[in-house]
Structures are given as structure tokens and as C-alpha cells.
Image (spheres, rainbow, N blue to C red):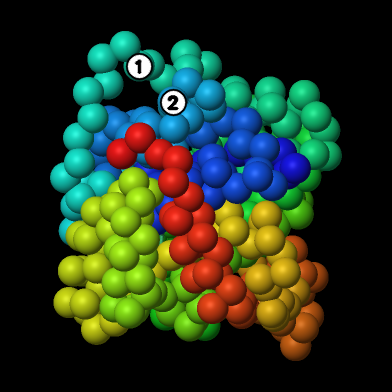
């Protein structure tokens, strides 16, 4: 089993990534940590509990609340893309509470409890991770690896022309994390997600036809994003976050990687949050492995079989 934490701004594909961590037998999901990102913080908490519920895992994995805004900038949301992040589903949270320990402290503690074993799946802005490195200098060495969903390889952004959302929202945190000395695997938004983790109408119909609680959940959760994606010419739903969790547990899905020096722009007028991925010719030392390609059919088949699972309380 893979000891892991998912650090998330829970909306749409973050929910599917949580299902991966909750339902894949290879995963040992020790905590969910929350960071400001996609939608309002309280809505993200609600969405995480809703996802635990549909997976039949309420109470079995703690949710720790983390940083409520980026390091130095005001929070900006992706509500125009994701709506409330769960397609209007609601759940009464009476009697349910997040763990009282702050997410940054939980990350530090969990890493220290099993040095060199814990992988953090980072599928939101990197504010909690950067803060943990500042609070505990041993954190970097205690963590086995970070799987970071963020940036684009060769600059096709999804929030600006240059930047992907997670790095755009907290570029200072992202820059600090790449400079900190972690073992990092990057799952970029483009071209990887568009080429290898895009589910078109045929696949969405197949998932709906599974007719399980989890497939109904998937369809609802992805509805708002599907409308947005279509409005900007993307023909399906994009799944960068669940891909990030999936490739950690199933590296056999990965078909091409490369070593890059990754840095993040914090000052540019048009390029805030741009991920500069330099290869050998620039004479910089690699600090990350970037996934350039995965097996699209393998990834889709994996998610589909996860959703075919009959468990789930939805
Ligand atoms: C990332 O930003 C968010 O909209 C998604 O949750 C994903 O983590 C993609 O750029
Ligand atoms: Ca996310």
C-alpha cells in the first residue's frame, strides 16, 4: 500500500481524486488536507464530506483544514468553471466536524511519523506545502515525494494564456515548493490532461450507464465543468487531479516522463503563475520529473472500473 495524503481544494475532479484515494486497494489514505482554491472554503469542506459519504468512508479518514488564502495574494476562485464543485448536491453536515488539528501541522506530523514513506498528492494551490516547509525545516526530508498537479508544459494556461490555476492562485507558494528540495513529480494541465485525461461524450455516456451510486456522483460532480469546457472548445471533461492520484498508485499508466528544472513566475504582468520547465540546454539542474504522457485508455478504464464499484452511499 502507498501511504498518502491528498491536499485538495475540493471541487469536481478533486472529488474523483478523493475517490481514488478512498477506494483503490493500493492506497493507504491517511488524511485529507484542505487548501484555499477552487470554491469557497466552507463549500470545499462540504464537498469533501460529501465525497467521503458517497465512498462509504465517513469517519474513517480525517479532514484537516489548512490555509484559507494564498501566501501573499488575495484568494481567487474557479467558481466560474466549477460552480459549487458538486453539481448542486447538498449534504447535512450536522454531527460531522473536521479534525481540530491544522492541515499544516497534520502534514508535518504525518511526515515525521514515518520518515521517507509519505507521499503528498497536491491537487490545489501549494500554500499548505510551502507553509509546512517554513514551519518545520525537517519536513522536506521527512516527505517521500510530492505528486503536484500544476502548471503546463509549454505554457497553455487554463486561467490565463500562460498559467494553470493551481500555480496562478499561489505562485509564491509554488515557487517556494520547487526550490525546497522535494522529490517532485509534476502532472501538468497541458498538454497532458487534454491529450490523455479528457473524457468525451461516449465515455461520459458509458460511465452514466454503469448506473452505480459512484457513477451518478461522477456525472453530477462533472456537469458544471463539462458545460464550461464545452463553452471554451474542450470536448469533454478534464481529469488532472484524479490522474495525479492514479499515476501515484499505478505508475504503469505513465508512458513518457522527462527531467526538468521547474520554476514558477511570480512577477510577470502577463505570466503570473507560469511554470518555466527548462530542459538540459539551459544548463539548469533538474528538480522535478514531469509526466509528458500517460495511456489514455488505461486511465479511463481505471476510473471507469473504480466507478463501477457498487459501494457508495449516494
Ligand atoms: C486545477 O485547477 C482546478 O480547477 C482543478 O481542481 C485542478 O486542480 C487544474 O488547473
Ligand atoms: Ca484541484
Inter-mark Cα distance, 2 to 1: 9 Å
**Residue 281 position in % (x across, y down):** 75, 88
- Mark 2 vs 1: CB contact within 8 A: yes
> Under tag 1, what secondary structure?
loop
Residue at the bottom extreme, as displayed: 281
Q: Is residue 39 above or below residue 254?
A: above
Q: Quadrant of the N terminus?
A: top right
Identify the image quadrant of residue 263: bottom right
**Residue 272 position in % (x across, y down):** 40, 65
Q: Residues within 10 Å of mark 1 (few under 14, many from 20)?
A: few
Q: Which residue is found at the position 57% from the left and 31% from the top?
A: 31
For the question of whether residue 172 can be seen, the reply is no
**Residue 178 position in % (x across, y down):** 65, 56
Q: Quadrant of the C terminus?
A: top left
Query: Is 196 displayed left or right of 51 in the figure?
Result: right
Q: Residues within 10 Å of mark 2 (few under 14, many from 20)?
A: some
Q: Which residue is found at the position 35% from the left and 71% from the top?
A: 206
**Residue 105 position in % (x across, y down):** 59, 23
Q: Which mark is residue 96?
A: 1
Query: Is 132 displayed left or right of 71 in the figure?
Result: right
Identify the image quadrant of residue 41: top left
Label 1, ligand 2: CB separation under 8 Å: no
For the question of whether residue 184 can be seen, the reply is yes
Query: Is 54 displayed left or right of 299 in the figure?
Result: left
Label 2, ligand 2: CB separation under 8 Å: no
Q: Residue 16 versus residue 126: which sits nearer the camera?
A: 16
Q: Which mark is residue 157?
A: none
Q: Which mark is residue 58?
A: 2
Amino acid at each position: 500500500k502507498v501511504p498518502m495524503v491528498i491536499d485538495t481544494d475540493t471541487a469536481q475532479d478533486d472529488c474523483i481524486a478523493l475517490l481514488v484515494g478512498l477506494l483503490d486497494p493500493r492506497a493507504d489514505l491517511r488524511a485529507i488536507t484542505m487548501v484555499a482554491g477552487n470554491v469557497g472554503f466552507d463549500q470545499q469542506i462540504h464537498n469533501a464530506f460529501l465525497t467521503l459519504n458517497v465512498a462509504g468512508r465517513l469517519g474513517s479518514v480525517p479532514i484537516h483544514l489548512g490555509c484559507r488564502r494564498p501566501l501573499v495574494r488575495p484568494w481567487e476562485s474557479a467558481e466560474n468553471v466549477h460552480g459549487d464543485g458538486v453539481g448542486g448536491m447538498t449534504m447535512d453536515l450536522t454531527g460531522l466536524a473536521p479534525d481540530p488539528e491544522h492541515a499544516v501541522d497534520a502534514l508535518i506530523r504525518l511526515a515525521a511519523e514515518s520518515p521517507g514513506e509519505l507521499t503528498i498528492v497536491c491537487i490545489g494551490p501549494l500554500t499548505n506545502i510551502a507553509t509546512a516547509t517554513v514551519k518545520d525545516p525537517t519536513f522536506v526530508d521527512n516527505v517521500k515525494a510530492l505528486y503536484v498537479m500544476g502548471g503546463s508544459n509549454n505554457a497553455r494556461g487554463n486561467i490565463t494564456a500562460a498559467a494553470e490555476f493551481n500555480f496562478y492562485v499561489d505562485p509564491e507558494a509554488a515557487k517556494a515548493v520547487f526550490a525546497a528540495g522535494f522529490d517532485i513529480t509534476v502532472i501538468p494541465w497541458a498538454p497532458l490532461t487534454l491529450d490523455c485525461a479528457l473524457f468525451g461524450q461516449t465515455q461520459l455516456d458509458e460511465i452514466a450507464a454503469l448506473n452505480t451510486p459512484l457513477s451518478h456522483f461522477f456525472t453530477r460532480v462533472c456537469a458544471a465543468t463539462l458545460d464550461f469546457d464545452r463553452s471554451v472548445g474542450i470536448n469533454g471533461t478534464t481529469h488532472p487531479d484524479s490522474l495525479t492520484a492514479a499515476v501515484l498508485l499505478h505508475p504503469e499508466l505513465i508512458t513518457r516522463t522527462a527531467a526538468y528544472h521547474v520554476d514558477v513566475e511570480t512577477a510577470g504582468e502577463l505570466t503570473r503563475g507560469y511554470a518555466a520547465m527548462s530542459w538540459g540546454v539551459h544548463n539548469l539542474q533538474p528538480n522535478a520529473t514531469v509526466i509528458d504522457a500517460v495511456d489514455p485508455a488505461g486511465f479511463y478504464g481505471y476510473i471507469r472500473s473504480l466507478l463501477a464499484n457498487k459501494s457508495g452511499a449516494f
